[in-house]
Image (cartoon, grey):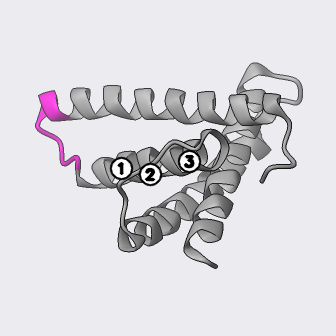
Amino acid sequence: MDHLSALIKEESIRSFRSTISKCENAWIQMNEKGSNTTLLEKRLNALKVGLAVLENAWHVQTHQYTSDELAEARIILKGLVPSIEHSYARSKPGSPQRTLLERRKKSLDLAIQAIEDYCGG
């Protein structure tokens, strides 16, 4: 993971922060409507874990997550990849949406790899 450019690392961190912000806003709206937020809460937590692991790998920032929390986050993050790939396939080449999806997928892949590296596989 050290071989990555500073630009890719920064884009990945920004992508995670943006996705977390969008999920937090969605959670607020769903909560106000009385909708079930369990799945969104799990995804939001997994995204926060992914961000923390990337920051740990690249900026030596510590995190408080257990091996079990890391393993669960890895599974959830892996589960998000197919929907991003599906949206990417339907997006127009060169569009801002496609660029966003490319960065989001790259950041998820990097977080999954960082979790696997951190947990030893």
For marks 3 and 2, give the CA distance.
10 Å
Q: Tell me if residue 41 comes above or below residue 115 in the rendering.
A: above
Mark 3 vs 2, N-terminal side: 2
The magenta segment: 31-37
> Measuring 81% from the left and 28% from the top, which residue is drawn there?
7
Q: Is residue 13 shown to the viewer in this render? A: yes
Position of the C terminus by quadrant: bottom right
Residue nearest the observer in this picture, 115 or 72: 115
Cβ atoms at labels 2 and 1 below 8 Å apart: yes
Relative side of 26 to 67, left or right: left
For marks 2 and 1, give the CA distance.
6 Å
Q: Tell me if residue 97 comes above or below residue 40 in the rendering.
A: above
Residue topped by disc 3: 56
Residue 49 belongs to magenta span: no
Kind of element beneath mark 2: helix
Kind of element beneath mark 1: helix
Give the total of numbered labels: 3
> Measuring 69% from the left and 55% from the top, which residue is drawn there?
109
Q: Is residue 86 shown to the viewer in this render? A: no
Given the image, on which type of amino acid does mark 3 rest?
A: Asn
Given the image, on which type of amino acid does mark 2 rest?
A: Val
Q: Which numbered tag is attached to residue 49?
A: 2
Marks 2, 1: nearer the viewer = 2
Residue topped by disc 1: 45
* Residue 107 horizontal/vertical position (percent): 67, 44
Which corner quadrant of the image does residue 38 belong to?
bottom left
